Amino acid sequence: MKNKQLALVIDLNVCVGCHACVTSCKEWNTQGSAGPLTDLHAYGENPTGTFFNRVQTYETGSFPNTQTIHFPKSCLHCEEPPCVPVCPTGASYKRAEDGIVLVDYDKCIGCKYCSWACPYGARELDEERQVMTKCTLCVDRIYSETLPEAERKPACVMACPTSARIFGDVHDPESEASKTIANRGGYALMPEWETIPANHYLPRSITETIAAVKEEN
Amino acid sequence: MFNPFSSKPVHDPIHKISPIDEVKKTTCYMCACRCGIRAHLRDGELVYIDGNPEHPLNQGVICAKGSSGIMKQKSPARITQPLLRKKGSDRGAGEFEVIDWETAFGILTERLAKIRATDPKKFALFTGRDQMQALTGLFARQFGTPNYAAHGGFCSVNMAAGMIYTIGGSFWEFGGPDLDHAKLFIMIGTAEDHHSNPMKIALSKFKRAGGRFISINPVRTGYSAIADEWIPIKPGTDGALFMALMHQLIANQQYDAPFLERYTNSGQLVCLDPGPEEGLFLFDPNFDPLNPNLPHNKYVWDLQTNSAQPCYQENVRPALTGEFTMGLGPHAGKRVAPAFELLRRQVKDCTPEWASAITGISAKRICKLADEIGHAAFQQEFSLPIPWTDTWGKTHDSVVGRPVAFHAMRGLSAHSNGFQTVRGLAVLMSLLGTIDRPGGFRHKAPFPRQPNVKPPSCNSDIKPNTPLGKPPLGWPTQPEDLSLNEDGAPLRIDKAFSWEHPLAIHGLMHNVITNAVKGDPYSIDTLMIFMANMSWNSTMNTTEVRTLLNTKGDDGEFKIPFLVVCDAFQSEMVNFADLVLPDTTYLERHDVMSMLDRPISEFDGPVDSVRIPVLPPTGNCKPFQEVIVELASRLKFPAFTTADGQRKFSGYTDFIVNYQTDLVDGIGFLAGWRGKNGEKSLRGEPNPNQWDEYAKNNCVFHYQMPIEHQYMRNWNHSYLKFAKENALRKDNDPIMINIYSDILQKFRLAAKGSRPGRTPPAHLKERILRYFDPLPFWYAPLEEEVTNLNEFPLNAITQRPMAMYHSWDSQNAWLRQIHSHNYLFINTKTAQEHQIEDGAWMWVESQWGKVKCMARHSEAVDPGTVWTWNAIGKAESAWSLDPNANESKKGFLLNHLISEELPFGEFRVSNSDPITGQAGWYDVRVKILSADDQTTSSETWPQFKAYTVPGMIALKQES
């Protein structure tokens, strides 16, 4: 039996790029065990800061056949995470019990080697704390003993207005996450890097013109 | 002990820091969606905000803005002290001294009392937020001034007016698409802000259930990204598309004839003979009008007896087409036609080819769209087994569903042709038989409603020391309802409800400053602005308005003698005030989303909600509603004063519990837990514990109506009774859909001179004749008539991003890490034709002004359109941002390109819709060129300065 591997499944078919996942993550984690998340030049020129999750919006194709794609990206909690073996201090580690990849801030020396190794750009240096930071899958929420059970999920999953983020064990074929991947053709990002990312994406699908009109044309 | 060779983590990722010890529920106000939220506190400090899973509106979700509420609370742009401008300093220079509240109240009470005792209309109160109008409107009415409105006039009044005058409801707060049952959903001209989370929830569910989503928009961003199909369209041409769709549907017999016959005025007979009745319905003197304002006693042509019969008869088959002559009776010999016949003639030439040339959408695609819509409506018809009785006594054992739904917003309204465009959409939706039916459009309480209240209509309606007999804002249905004094000049400072803007139901806030300074129609004394940034992006011609605010007359006095600004944040407008009143944030106060206002109702019933303070007010901030209640009490307004002259309400919360409207007993601001013990809903005696009940119930009250009341409400007998009994409506007559608007025709006849009663001034006759068409039609925006379209070939529009909201609000440390400045998005080919590279500095120019900014190539925009994000660009140092902040150096507004007036022969008219006064933001035409000095350019142009004012929270130390 495979070990538990918690992960997120992100549905690109309903993500509208609202950034709820981005700021609800920042908000939860800056006050929690993983925080604080730095804000640099908060009210000045070129504001920047630490986020564990970002949404980028891409265009493909050319007018008028343009597709606009909102693409959230955070640490994919790879099954073979390249960021772990390269870490000189052992700060970068993958938990055996649930597969979450984490940074131990007390061991991290901010050398950034892990961010070179990660092909997804999921690792950021927190400029103020000088340690590497990344998505923790809200490990402090999922193991919380005070949150109501239905809320022991990552902040981004609770926040997402289009329910585009599904959380669960991708090694358990009965989990919602696994079923969705199977039913909707969920895919891994850049499989050629052989990182076996645990996070998956659900592709876009187009609901075509209704049959009657199709025939006429 | 720390073992350096251990692989065990040292930092515990789950470690229990001091727990979150308190969770308070309230309502968000990062935008006007008003989701239910939970504020989590640790040792009294706000540390986390999330959605409340038990709230019906957002069901636990929260957006980027709501999640960032903490940084708004902590914003260094907060103003915390009442301020008075230093004598002798310029407005806009930001030189203030701190005063206390007692002084502020003293100044205001003295000045306002004087105005109220002499000439009440010299006090103007304009608020940026529409959702507090129940109280601010009451204040203005009790004061006795007609000069009151919120911001709808420059935002989306066309959406409200165009639809409410047609079907008795509109989108967003008033109603919306039923995506639970729809199969085809068409979203037109919509960004994200109206409306936000509930639309996201519904859209996701809809897509997952296999629904097909089409987005019609010049730009493909936001929601449009997940559309199954994007149909690019030229801005301001959607009306032509709707006309062509109606043409197709009528030509293909794809309209719901039984629905039109029974529930709309399609069959009602319109007089065709020239004269005072031309284009008006004929009335049967033998039948009860039911509602004297909107009489029902009209005729239809019965095809069975080939004669005119009173409408609403059961055994009659009304004709929808043809032309007839009235038989014996009071109208003998008159030529008439059913309203639908006139619509049919109106769209006859509106072919897909005609619309294609205007919209840029191929004729083939327009035909296909009409077929898709028709197919969804008629081939996918279904019914729900819900019995109901109509207003004429007939019982139905089910409700028909036609699963094609629409949603539209500012992309349609913010044009000078918006009203007729929106009417076109509303008529299209009615032809399809989708009004208040499953899978189509559904109303939200207190709607459906029809025009009934009227604004003041003559000088004598305004008296010193007397509340207005009529509310400041209303719904004119004829020229006699206009707000004019005896010589025909406008009664209101913004000229709303004048011949220039007859149906300006939301006022024209964007005209106030210009009109007041010009003294046209008259000058005022005091202008009080709440939560609105009139000297920044809520104004056209920003530069000019800023100059006007500082303009003095020959007597050395400012043209607007006294300017009061109430805000929580140092927006650009604050700098221009004489008196600044610091408001609290939404986390620091009580608030009410009232049924008397624009609540957050669901399709299935009324919903109202409150805010309860999570944190104490910062510094010396005072909630604006408390200020209003305090002023009203000091000025001894009758509604705020007991019979023996004492103050009636101790403050806002007391007012909310104990105030009852004049019209009907037992109706107050909050509908939940009324009655002495909180046992009554919607109507009942004040309950002293009402606020506690809301606090215990997620700050929300949701009244779910029985299923028999949830559909066909315009004509649903028991719903109409319920609505009247609970004061959702004043009357209970059916709200017939106006395919044809005789209201507009009355104004047209006045312009023609063939109608007794008020007539427009000579220079406006042609204009009213042209635009007050009783049927929808498309015309090119007014701006185009005064623009050289060869020199300025491109359209320029804006929209709000999902992760930012408004300029009257505040910057936000987190949100500005997502959007700190904006670019002008240009179609790649268009940019290349102008030698403008991606990221390069460029100029965008209209005939009124020019702006320097940076370019961004995009394939997701129609080649004839350029666009940018609204409300990102700021003045230097606004909101306490660093002088070098990207918002001012790299951000920009398009407003400088837009004129608030257009030349009109030898006159000037407002750059707005001739029917409602809606500001024509998206009509402007521009040209683009590369900037010469690519390497030396480092900032946008024009640049403005704002100033820090005393009492602002100290900036965080920069790291």
Image: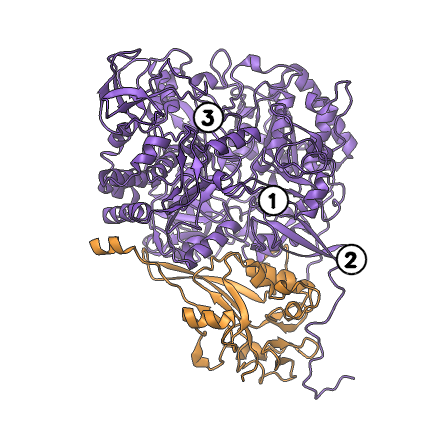
Chain colours: A orange, B purple
Which tag, 1 or 2, sits closer to the chain's start? 2
| Discs 3 and 2 carry the same chain letter | yes
Query: Where's residue A149, x and y in %?
Result: 64, 65
Residue type for callout 3: Asp
In the rendered structure, the residue with mark 1 lies on which chain? B
Viewport quadrant of the N terminus of chain B: bottom right
Q: Secondary structure at mark 3?
A: loop
Let me know if residue B883 appears in the view: no
Q: Nearer the viewer, residue B473 or B128?
A: B473
Give the answer, above or below, for where B789 lies relative to B550: below
- Tell me whether circle 1 and circle 2 mark residues in contact (CB < 8 Å): no
Query: Where's residue A119, x and y in %?
Result: 49, 76
Give the CA separation, mark 3 to mark 2: 56 Å
Label 1 crowd bin: few (<14), some (14–19), many (20+), radius 10 Å: many
Q: Nearer the viewer, mark 3 or mark 2?
A: 3
- Tell me whether circle 3 and circle 2 mark residues in contact (CB < 8 Å): no
Q: Nearer the viewer, mark 1 or mark 2?
A: 2
Q: Give the residue at mark 2.
A: B43
- Taking the image as shown, residue B719 lies to the left or right of residue B419, namely right
Give the CA separation, mark 1 to mark 2: 28 Å
Q: Give the residue at mark 1.
A: B809
User: Among all residues in the image, which is located at the extreme bottom?
Assistant: B5
Which tag, 3 or 1, sits closer to the chain's start? 3
Q: Give the residue at mark 3.
A: B733
Q: Nearer the viewer, mark 3 or mark 1?
A: 3
